[in-house]
Amino acid sequence: PPDIAVANVKAHLNQLQSIATANGGNRAHGRPGYLASVTYVKGLLDAAGFTTQQQSFTYNGATGYNLIADWPGGDTSDTVMIGAHLDSVTAGPGINDNGSGSAANLEVALAVARTGFQPTRHLRFGWWGAEELGLRGSTAYVNSLSSAQKAAIGAYLNFDMVASPNPGYFLYDGDNSDGTGAGPGPAGSAEIEDTLEAYFASIGVPTRGTDFDGRSDYGPFISAGIPAGGIFTGAEGRKTSAQVSLWGGTTGAFDPCYHAACDTIANLNDTALDRNSDAIASAVWSLSSGTVPPPT
Ligand code: PHE
Ligand code: ZN
Ligand code: ZN
Ligand code: ZN
Ligand code: CA
């Protein structure tokens, strides 16, 4: 897999910041900054050779949009889907939440095109609307699929907050090895966790599990029985002193600007953004080439 240039990811985040600044300070559902964000991402994907669809839905009296981007080729009955929510809350520009996952996934998609990657499995990327109002876009997408179309998604990878300023490295706990809260993900989720875990092991960064607690867009996918996984660097929760020993940083919140006006381009940990962008590329390449590393 390619090494994703974090400068390219940052360039997308600068664009999302400019879009928010030009549209009343946010990129929220039903506000002009949201559609401008979709238009920015779509323009780059169309130019790179993706087949894109802007899916509309209605929530709270406003039209919302999902952006779906298919990379032509691969086995469409066995699709790997990579998603991130593109909307912010109304309080701020949403650069860590979730410009970070949106921009990292975008740059990985552009790397797929740039390298002419021809995976065994089909690749599809999704940018979700109205996550912040209750996973509305991802739910509309999954509800729009037939049973056969749901069964054709072999894996869903979710990236929501991957550059928190005081980061942890949490992987959705597919195998329930942490034994707390929500149980394991659907069968196949453990392999996705193992794949991400293997990447972090290769760069010497420890990871921990985070429950599938329903707080992000993997929710409707796991409800449909689709194996899922992903990375999360932490939101309003506080880093424990044990986690500071593991990852550095401070015992404050993972993201002190969570859902706030200060979630700007200054609210990012560039090291986390770089590592996680590379981890996404690594997982996309290895999962879609049909090879999965052994459990660790
Ligand atoms: N989905 C939450 C939000 O957008 C953030 C979050 C992601 C919380 C993953 C927990 C786990 O605000
Ligand atoms: Zn890198
Ligand atoms: Zn949020
Ligand atoms: Zn989020
Ligand atoms: Ca685990």
Image (tube, rainbow, N blue to C red):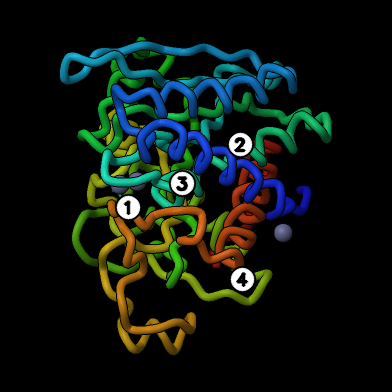
Q: Position of residue 28 (x, y in %)?
A: 32, 32
Residue receiving disc 2: 106
Q: Amino acid at mark 2?
A: Leu
Please tell me the numbered disc located at residue 201. 4
Q: Earlier in the sequence, mark 4 or mark 2?
A: 2
- Indicate which label's residue lies in the foreground, 4 or 3: 3
Per the model, the C-alpha gap separating discs 4 and 2 is: 24 Å
Q: Amino acid at mark 1?
A: Ala
Q: Position of residue 98 (x, y in %)?
A: 42, 45
Residue density around tag 1, few if under 14, some if 14–19, many if 20 or more, within 10 Å: some
Per the model, the C-alpha gap separating discs 4 and 3 is: 19 Å
Q: Position of residue 65 (x, y in %)?
A: 38, 18
Q: Quadrant of residue 249?
A: bottom left
Q: Is residue 278 above or below residue 23?
A: below
Residue receiving disc 1: 261
Per the model, the C-alpha gap separating discs 1 and 3 is: 21 Å
